[in-house]
């Protein structure tokens, strides 16, 4: 009779780089792939060596998140020669109206050329061309599963992913939620939730704002200064339903940038007064983000909401970043105090 150890040895082993869309889709991928009966192996959290290796293999103009992805792939290949596949999905379009950044469209093609890469387990999300279920069936076929088995796994993964999103909307931080997913724990909020006298919206791609190595633990720096941080993942689903019209001639085609602008539109209108400031973390050489950050900056000026844009790359320094964050927080705090005093004065005059 086979022991459980022998059974697990026979499972197909699939490596997942902890980078890029890991921070957005990992709960879905995990349930889907485990439902297709494979064993997952994740690369460790980003560290200095991973970044250095990624930078060495990534050519000059690439943004840092893609270079980091290279580093994670190389780490997985070196430490897990037993991998049968590397999971490198191709995200083209998730909704009919918008695309992912071109880097995501070509990800499997640029990873293939790295030395020693095992077979790639591709999974293409391109709802402009075909439904996700079609890609799931293809994925299952590659792993030797029937259509019904694949669709069952897909349904379960989608159900779990919805539950995960609800947990985020209830206020959980993405990193906390991902830790629970990784350890197969139920979704429970931490006992102590960080509160502060200021509330900031932190904008950016998940791989910029939740990879604490590359952003130099940015959220913690804010929290240490009494700032309560939340991200677009914590915002109600309803605000992402209506597209943002920039002006008659200019349309945004990037899916994540659309979400960023939708959340900003909320704070310019219904949610005005709910936050004290906005910070946008951008990767150096990111075309889509540099474009929309200019648009956001203009809007922020109109409503008088403090806005800080921080551009990160592999050379970002701890001391410089801390100084910028401290002075921004201080400036916002003073502004808030002054506004409170002014409104008190007005009330006294009325009396
Ligand atoms: S959106 Fe920007 S940071 Fe993200 S992969 Fe594309 S270029 Fe890089």
Image: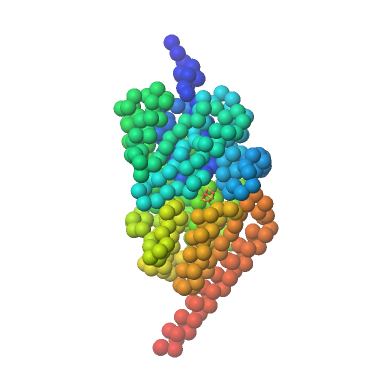
Quarter of image, res 133: top left
In-image side of 91 versus 314 (left or right): left
* Res. 177 visible in picture: no
Q: How many numbered circles are shown? A: 0
Looking at the image, is 235 positioned above or below residue 8? below
In-image side of 36 versus 201 (left or right): left
Quarter of image, res 43: top right
Q: Residue at x 46, y 33 (%)?
A: 122
Residue nearest the observer in this picture, 117 or 68? 117
* Res. 33 visible in picture: yes
Residue 251 in the image: state x and y as whole percent.
41, 59
Quadrant housing the C terminus: bottom left
Residue nearest the observer in this picture, 47 or 341? 47
Residue 208 in the image: state x and y as whole percent.
55, 50
Q: Residue at x 41, y 68 (%)?
A: 268
Residue 110 in the image: state x and y as whole percent.
55, 38
Please identify the residue farthest to the front as the structure is shown: 249
Quarter of image, res 308: bottom right
Please identify the residue farthest to the left as the structure is shown: 148
How was the colour assigned to the protein in this rendering?
rainbow
Residue 82 in the image: state x and y as whole percent.
56, 23
Q: Residue at x 49, y 77 (%)?
A: 340
In-image side of 132 versus 307 (left or right): left
Quadrant housing the N terminus: top left
Q: Residue at x 36, y 44 (%)?
A: 128
């Amino acid at each position: 009779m086979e022991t459980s150890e022998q059974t697990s040895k026979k499972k197909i082993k699939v490596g997942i780089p902890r980078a890029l869309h890991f921070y957005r889709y990992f709960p879905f991928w995990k349930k889907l792939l485990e439902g297709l009966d494979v064993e997952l192996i994740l690369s460790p959290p980003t560290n200095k060596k991973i970044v250095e290796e990624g930078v060495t293999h990534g050519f000059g103009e690439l943004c840092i998140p893609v270079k980091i992805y290279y580093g994670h792939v190389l780490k997985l290949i070196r430490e897990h020669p037993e991998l049968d596949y590397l999971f490198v999905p191709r995200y083209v379009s998730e909704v009919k109206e918008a695309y992912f950044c071109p880097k995501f469209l070509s990800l499997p093609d640029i990873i293939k050329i790295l030395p020693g890469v095992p077979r790639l387990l591709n999974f293409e999300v391109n709802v402009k061309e075909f439904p996700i279920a079609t890609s799931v069936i293809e994925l299952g076929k590659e792993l030797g599963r029937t259509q019904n088995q694949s669709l069952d796994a897909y349904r379960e993964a989608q159900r779990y992913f919805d539950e995960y999103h609800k947990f985020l909307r209830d206020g959980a931080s993405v990193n906390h939620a991902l830790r629970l997913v990784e350890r197969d724990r139920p979704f429970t909020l931490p006992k102590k939730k960080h509160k502060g006298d200021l509330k900031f919206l932190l904008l950016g791609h998940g791989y910029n704002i939740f990879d604490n190595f590359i952003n130099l633990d940015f959220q913690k720096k804010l929290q240490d200064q009494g700032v309560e941080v939340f991200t677009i993942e914590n915002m109600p689903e309803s605000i992402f339903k209506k597209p943002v019209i920039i002006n008659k001639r200019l349309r945004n085609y990037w899916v994540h940038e659309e979400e960023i602008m939708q959340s900003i539109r909320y704070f310019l209108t219904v949610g005005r007064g709910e936050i004290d400031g906005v910070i946008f973390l951008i990767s150096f050489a990111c075309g889509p983000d540099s474009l929309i950050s200019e648009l956001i900056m203009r809007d922020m000026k109109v409503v008088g909401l403090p806005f800080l844009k921080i551009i990160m790359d592999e050379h970002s320094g701890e001391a410089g970043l801390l100084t910028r964050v401290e002075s921004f927080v201080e400036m916002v705090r003073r502004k808030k105090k002054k506004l409170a005093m002014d409104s008190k004065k007005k009330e006294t005059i009325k009396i």
